[in-house]
């Protein structure tokens, strides 16, 4: 019986998993780099071991050996989708809390996952079956599926090695550029071609399997609000799917067919693009816990991390597919240390002030505290602010209320940005697509009314009593409406 | 009591007595200012304030120091270009003596794998470049001076 679990991660997800470990009555082991020696996740651990990097598999395995840990949770990012690391854990006698190395490997490359989806009968975006060999094959494929097309790196992600081609004249140079960028970024110049969907939604299906072949899904999450191909707002249910149980069932079954073909166990997510006509296409499988898993938990009343622990230790799935139910609506805003008015540029630095919301329907998965310096070295995610309410309009109103209670000073952040996005008529209507934020014109609101300015001066004057008695000069970036 | 209000580009005098406004500072540091019956929620850390959720920069200072504490320009017209955020210098695009237009790229900073070009806020000549490639800079650190 495993009693000690090492969490090979940092930030809010390490806190999330360590909390579940405590709730399960087990001992949580953290690892930390020198930069993170005062990080919040250490406060949720029973033991902590230094490592030089969260990517150093040997150092992490050594920490697990010294701790006498029987299992390892990888979180997301870092080593979580590294099949070689999962295999090393198994060799070292550590239970890897996630799918088997074989399943990670089978779904690891986008083209391999696509092949598997095609064989399993899940719809995929029309395009080449594998890497495209030369320009004549590219011309033939693009003409057959119709322009516009997307060229993508086979080993890629994050938009690297990706080119949109509107017409045949642009194909040859775009193919060359994409291949050389892919070569530089991923040490593999292999690219493939698929039909470019216009204003697609990004909708994904949460799946879960035990070690005995039982696989079920927990419905969808809408993740269309993205910047730089990274999600910032996620919802469950999707406004498109919420009133369309047949679509949820069809997407769920497609996700499960791919998972079954890969021999999938534990938590995973099948990502789909959905076109304007509501047709969905399998994109890839994320073989780990997702950043946005809380919205599914809030609406389906399950705890996916507890389920991960149970399944990894040989527990049988406690739920049948027909016992999974969806109630209400949940929204997650990813609070980032970044400047939405300046191309979302990361803004590490000291958090001078931090007040987080509470009250009915709020769930906060937080990884930082007041006085902590957000390091320059890691992802700028501070916390995930989630709300649940009876329906989507109430969830939006609750999120607006929660954002008004949130105070972050000292680093640029996206709290005020979310308040504007959530007030946008298109967002409220649920008419979303992955280019939503490209079309969204964010203007920080720094205009103070006369009354607000006077109120601010009163507070500042009281904080600096000497100056309050002298004639005052007020300097500001405040501007009149 | 007379006060002078300086915005980003303008200054003007206002008549206002801050002690006339009642306010309460709560235990967690948030101040509630009552303007009539209207509640304004204010919190601050140094010169950064959140006023009803809107982030602004405000300072109170003695009017005699006003010139020295202006918008980054001193009497000679020299202007310091500072890092808006911490980062690492990955490229320097200008050299001392070089004339630059408003919006011209001065250098490139990188943080958390994101690159950001620091641009000139106005036309002028580069006086000094205070950093070199590979330097890690703090928020507010002077990168380049313009003349």
Image: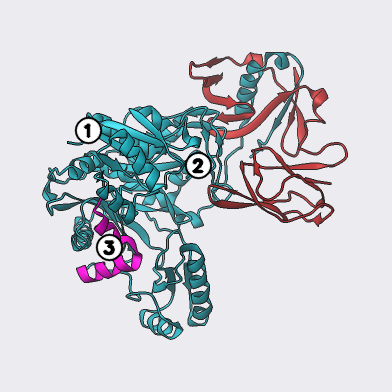
Which of the two discs, 1 and 3, labels the residue nearer the N terminus? 1
Q: How many marks?
A: 3
Alpha-carbon span between mark 1 and mark 3: 31 Å
Front tag of 2 and 1:
1
Residue mark closest to the camera, 3 vs 2: 3
Label 1 SS: loop
Residue marked by disc 2:
A414
Q: Judge the density around disc 1: few (<14), some (14-19), many (≥20) Cα neighbours within 10 Å.
A: some
Coordinates of residue A402 in the picture (x, y in percent): 41, 33
Which of the two labelled residues, at mark 2 and mark 1, occupies the earlier sequence position? 1
Residue farthest to the right, as pictured? B76
Quick one: which chain is red?
Answer: B
Residue at the spot 81% in from the left edge and 30% down from the top edge: B68
**Chain to which mark 2 belongs:** A
Q: Which chain is cyan?
A: A
Quadrant in the picture for the N terminus of chain A = top left
Q: Quadrant of the C terminus of chain A?
A: top right
The span from disc 2 to disc 1 (Cα, nearest Å) is 39 Å
Magenta segment range? A98-121
Residue under circle 1? A3
Question: Can residue A391 be spotted in the picture?
Answer: no
Disc 3 on helix, strand or loop? helix
- The picture places residue A257, in percent across and down from the top left corner, at 19, 62
Is A118 contained in the magenta span?
yes
Give the SS element for disc 2.
loop
Q: What residue sits right under mark 3 in the picture?
A: A106
Name the N-terminal-most of marks 3 and 2: 3
User: Closest to the observer: A328 or A72?
Assistant: A72
The part of the image, by quadrant, that contains residue A126 is bottom left
Name the magenta segment's main secondary structure.
helix
The x and y percentages for residue A258 are 22, 62
Position of A149 relative to B84 (above/below): below
């Amino acid at each position: 019986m495993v009693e000690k679990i090492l969490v090979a991660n940092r930030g809010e997800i390490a806190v999330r998993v360590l909390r579940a470990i405590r709730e399960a009555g087990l001992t949580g082991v953290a690892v930390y780099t020198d930069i993170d020696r005062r990080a919040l996740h250490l406060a949720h651990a029973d033991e902590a071991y230094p490592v030089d990097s969260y990517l150093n598999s040997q150092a992490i395995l050594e920490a697990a050996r010294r701790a006498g840990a029987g299992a390892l949770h990888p979180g997301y990012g870092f080593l979580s989708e590294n099949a070689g690391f999962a295999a090393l854990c198994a060799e070292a006698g550590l239970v890897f809390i996630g799918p088997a190395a074989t399943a990670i490997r089978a779904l690891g490359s986008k083209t391999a996952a696509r092949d598997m989806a095609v064989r399993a009968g899940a719809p995929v975006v029309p395009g080449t079956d594998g890497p495209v060999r030369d320009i004549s094959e590219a011309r033939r494929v693009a003409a057959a599926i119709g322009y516009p097309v997307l060229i993508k790196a086979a080993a890629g992600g994050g938009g690297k090695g990706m080119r949109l081609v509107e017409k045949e004249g642009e194909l040859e140079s775009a193919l060359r550029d994409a291949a050389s960028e892919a070569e530089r970024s991923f040490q593999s110049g292999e690219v493939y071609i698929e039909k470019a969907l216009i204003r697609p939604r990004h909708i994904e299906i949460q799946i879960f399997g035990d070690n005995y072949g039982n696989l079920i899904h927990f419905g969808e999450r809408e993740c269309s609000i993205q910047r730089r191909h990274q999600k910032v707002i996620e919802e469950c249910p999707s406004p498109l799917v919420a009133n369309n149980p047949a679509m949820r069932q069809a997407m769920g079954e497609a996700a499960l067919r791919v998972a079954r073909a890969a021999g999938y166990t534990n938590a995973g997510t099948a990502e789909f693009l959905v076109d304007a006509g509501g047709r969905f296409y399998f994109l890839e499988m994320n073989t780990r816990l997702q950043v946005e898993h809380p919205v599914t938990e809030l609406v389906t009343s399950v705890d996916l991390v507890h389920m991960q622990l149970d399944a990894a230790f040989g527990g049988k799935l406690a739920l049948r597919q027909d016992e999974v139910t969806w109630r209400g609506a949940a929204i997650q805003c990813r609070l980032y240390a970044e400047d939405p008015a300046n191309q979302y540029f990361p803004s590490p630095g000291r958090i001078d002030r931090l007040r987080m919301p509470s009250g009915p329907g709020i769930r906060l998965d937080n990884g930082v505290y007041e006085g902590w310096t957000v390091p320059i070295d890691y992802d700028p995610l501070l916390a995930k602010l989630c709300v649940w309410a009876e329906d989507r309009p109430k969830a939006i109103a609750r999120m607006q209320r929660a954002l008004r209670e949130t105070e972050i000073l000292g680093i640029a952040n996206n709290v005020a940005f979310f308040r504007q996005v959530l007030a946008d008529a298109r967002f409220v209507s649920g008419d979303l697509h992955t280019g939503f934020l490209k079309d969204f014109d964010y203007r920080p609101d720094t205009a103070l009314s006369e009354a607000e300015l006077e109120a601010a001066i009163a507070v500042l004057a009281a904080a600096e009593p000497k100056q309050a008695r002298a004639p005052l000069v007020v300097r500001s970036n405040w501007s009149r409406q | 009591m007379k006060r002078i209000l300086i915005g980003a580009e303008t200054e003007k005098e206002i008549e206002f007595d801050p002690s006339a406004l009642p306010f309460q500072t709560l235990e967690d540091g948030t101040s509630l200012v009552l303007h009539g019956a209207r509640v304004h929620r204010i919190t601050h850390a140094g010169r950064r304030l959140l006023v009803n959720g809107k982030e602004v920069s405000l300072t109170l200072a003695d009017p005699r120091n006003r010139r020295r504490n202006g918008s980054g320009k001193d009497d000679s017209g020299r202007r310091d270009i500072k890092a808006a955020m911490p980062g690492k210098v990955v490229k320097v695009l200008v050299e001392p003596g070089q004339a630059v237009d408003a919006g011209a790229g001065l250098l490139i900073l990188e943080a958390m794998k994101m690159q950001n070009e620091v641009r000139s806020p106005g036309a002028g000549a580069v006086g000094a470049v205070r950093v070199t490639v590979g330097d890690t800079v703090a928020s507010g650190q002077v990168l380049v001076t313009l003349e």
